[in-house]
Amino acid sequence: MEPFVRLDGIAAPMFRDNIDTDAIIPVSRMKALDADYGAGLFANLRYRADGSDDAEFVLNQPAYKHARILIAGDNFGCGSSREQAVWALLRFGIRCVIAGSFGDIFYGNCF
């Protein structure tokens, strides 16, 4: 992510611990060369099996559809090395993640 001094925007609460890189961007959403990483962000949580939006998921709720800040629990971005997890957040429009802690590899991929 590119550094910034100030960010104004909506903050979406996603108070879950251990959100891994597969939850952030499932491998099924990375197969195409022109993959739309923003649409793939949290795909297994944002969409139902039929592809429709899950209205209960925070980023599908009207108040948070244009969130620029994500507030998460501990160990955000844990799991396998997947730089596309950072790309998916950026392409969706998330510029800042505030969490109790971050997975080491995910954290490194942010810079």
Image (cartoon, grey):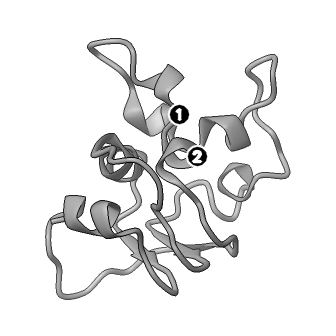
In the rendered image, which quarter is residue 51 located in? top right
Residue 106 position (above or below residue 104): above
- Residue 65, given in percent of the width and then of the height, sits at 61, 54
Residue 2 position (above or below residue 92): below
Kindly identify the residue that appears in the image at 52 percent across and 74 percent down.
75
Quarter of the image where the N terminus is located = bottom left
In the rendered image, which quarter is residue 50 located in? top right
Give the left or right position of residue 4, taking residue 50 as reference.
left
Q: Nearer the viewer, residue 69 or 80?
A: 80
Kindly identify the residue that appears in the image at 39 percent across and 33 percent down.
37
Badge 1 amino acid: Pro
Give the left or right position of residue 43, taking residue 40 as reference.
right
Which label was assigned to residue 77?
Answer: none
- Residue 12, given in percent of the width and then of the height, sits at 61, 70
- Residue 20, given in percent of the width and then of the height, sits at 53, 55
Badge 2 amino acid: Ala
The answer to whether the residue labelled 2 contacts the one labelled 1, judged by CB atoms less than 8 Å apart, is yes
Residue 15 position (above or below residue 37): below
- The kind of secondary structure element at disc 2 is helix
- List the residue tagged with mark 1: 26
In the rendered image, which quarter is residue 33 located in? top left
- List the residue tagged with mark 2: 23
Q: Nearer the viewer, residue 20 or 10?
A: 20
- Answer few, some or many: residues within 10 Å of disc 2's Cα (few below 14, many 20 plus, some between 14 and 19): some
- The kind of secondary structure element at disc 1 is loop
Kindly identify the residue that appears in the image at 22 percent across and 58 percent down.
109
Quarter of the image where the C terminus is located = bottom left
- Answer few, some or many: residues within 10 Å of disc 1's Cα (few below 14, many 20 plus, some between 14 and 19): many
Count all numbered tags in the image, as a single digit: 2
